[in-house]
Amino acid sequence: MRGADAEDPASFEPLIDGKTKAIYGDTVGNPKLNVFPFAEVSKIAKEAKLPLVIDSTVASPAVCRPIEHGANIVIHSLTKFIGGHGTSIGGIVVDAGNFDWGSGRFDEFTQPDHSYHGLVHWDAFKAFEPAGGANIAYIMKMRLQWLRDIGNCAAPFNSFQQLQGLETLHLRMERHCENAHKVADFLEAHDSVTWVNYPGLKSNVHHASAKQYFDTDKYGALVGFGVKGGLAGGSKFIDKLQLFSHLANIGDAKSLAIHPATTTHSQLDEADQLAAGLTPDFVRLSVGIEDIEDLLADLDQALKA
């Protein structure tokens, strides 16, 4: 199966046929940190009468609001920035209520649901008066049918932890983004680093898109870079870190680092790693909210090693 390339908006339309049900993308790709072309692809989605579904986990709601840029449904992994500590698994679906599910492409919304007393979801919820005449057809179908059948219900204690994290999201993301930008600047000037990928850098190929779609001066907490020494250099760098934790997660309040070529993607050959955007020297950082001088000192000593 061939997927569209978010760095080439023109690649989406040729793949749409009568069986296509949605266009799906990430606000920020991981690990490439490419920014989704909202303007171009949302236009394609509207013309094709397809919903645009966006995973905005990497950006978080404090950095980007995809609905304002044409998304119809937004999802987040709550385990990342919203929860903020990587302690509980969960996810969230946000229905913008701005998509026409009665266009004729979605029989499951316009035909009777025999598992729910013959309810026609679009007729019942396209202008639901108790909700002020809002279009809540998608999210109600999710609650009444999909959640009932599949059982994707967050545990109460997980929900408690994630709601606590949500309360401080706006404050944490300011620090995450500020620290990540300073880390990217530091790495860009370091003798042991061959390249740096961070949308906040003016030299970055995605900087203009990030400025267009992100909140002012907020470019996220993920930083990618290449260590001199390739595969061996990246692995040794990880081993020498003291403050950064060696974890595959992202979005924790604490800083995290991973060398995918020798860990998460080590089962792939080099060609497949490159196809996924992973070079042998690539290190991904999820920059936390610690004191920036401590973070820079840890990176510096590990790079010098």
Image (cartoon, rainbow, N blue to C red):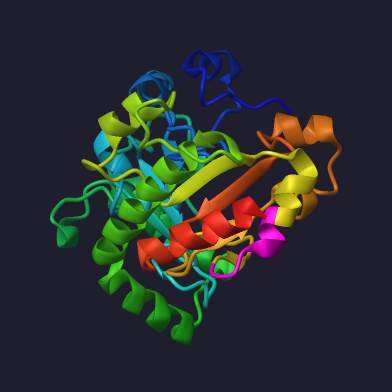
In the rendered image of this protein, does residue 52 appear above or below residue 236?
above
Estimate the x, y position of residue 40 in percent, counting from the top left. 38, 19
Question: Hey, which quadrant is residue 209 in on the image?
Answer: top left
Residue displayed at 86% across by 37% down: 269
Q: Nearer the viewer, residue 219 or 30?
A: 219
Specify the quadrant that holds the C terminus. Answer: bottom right
Specify the quadrant that holds the N terminus. Answer: top right
Q: How many marks?
A: 0
The residue sitting at the bottom extreme is: 157
In reply to whether residue 242 is colored magenta, the answer given is: yes
Residue displayed at 35% across by 40% down: 72
Magenta stretch bounds:
237-243
Residue displayed at 54% across by 72% down: 89
Q: Nearer the viewer, residue 55 or 194?
A: 194
Residue displayed at 69% across by 51% down: 259
Residue 121 visible here: no
In the rendered image of this protein, does residue 213 appear above or below residue 305?
above
In reply to whether residue 65 is colored magenta, the answer given is: no
The residue sitting at the left extreme is: 132
Estimate the x, y position of residue 83 in percent, counting from the top left. 41, 70
Estimate the x, y position of residue 91 in percent, counting from the top left. 48, 63
Residue 54 visible here: yes
| Relative side of 287 to 42, left or right | right
Estimate the x, y position of residue 143 in percent, counting from the top left. 43, 64
| Relative side of 59 to 232, left or right | left
Q: Nearer the viewer, residue 82 or 218?
A: 218
